Image: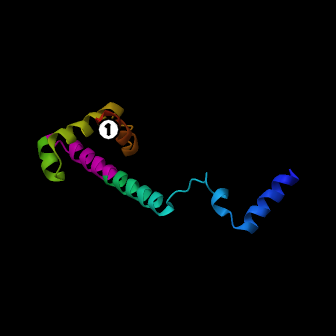
Amino acid sequence: MRKKIYDLTDRIREGDMNRLFEHFEGYDIQKVRKDSRSEGREEGRDILLITQIAKKLKRGKSPEIIADEVEESVESVNEVIEAIRSIGDEDFDAQKVLEIWKKSMPV
């Protein structure tokens, strides 16, 4: 063990830093933060959309009218409506609906 420590300190003194870090894998923390913020914003927009669709559906509006009002395709609105109906009216939870909706989306 002592020999390893001396080897390490010798490398540092000799300026052989490249070999010390040749297997180091770093990552771009700014990119990670930016990506996570972007995902959070997208999820927030989806939750808002789900909530709006649920409210309009409860008022008796048709999927076509809802799609026009929220500026989404009728297909997307129908997917959200299916997800809402799958959990039931009493247990409405936008986060659960989002999870179901995302699972039904093609990759």
Left or right, 9 with reference to 15? right
Q: Is residue 101 left or right of residue 14?
A: left
**In the rendering, at what x and y percent does residue 41 appear?**
36, 57
Magenta residues (range): 46-63
The residue where tag 1 is placed is 101
Is residue 62 visible to the viewer in this orientation of the structure? no
The secondary structure making up most of the magenta span is helix
Query: Compared to 106, does 28 lie above or below?
Result: below
Report the front residue among 5 and 36: 5
Confirm whether residue 29 shows in the render.
yes
Q: Nearer the viewer, residue 69 or 23?
A: 23
Q: Which residue sits at x=26%, y=50%?
A: 52
Most foreground residue, 104 or 95: 104
**Judging from the image, what secondary structure is the residue with disc 1 in?**
helix
The quarter of the displayed image where residue 22 is located: bottom right
In the shown orientation, is residue 28 left or right of residue 73?
A: right
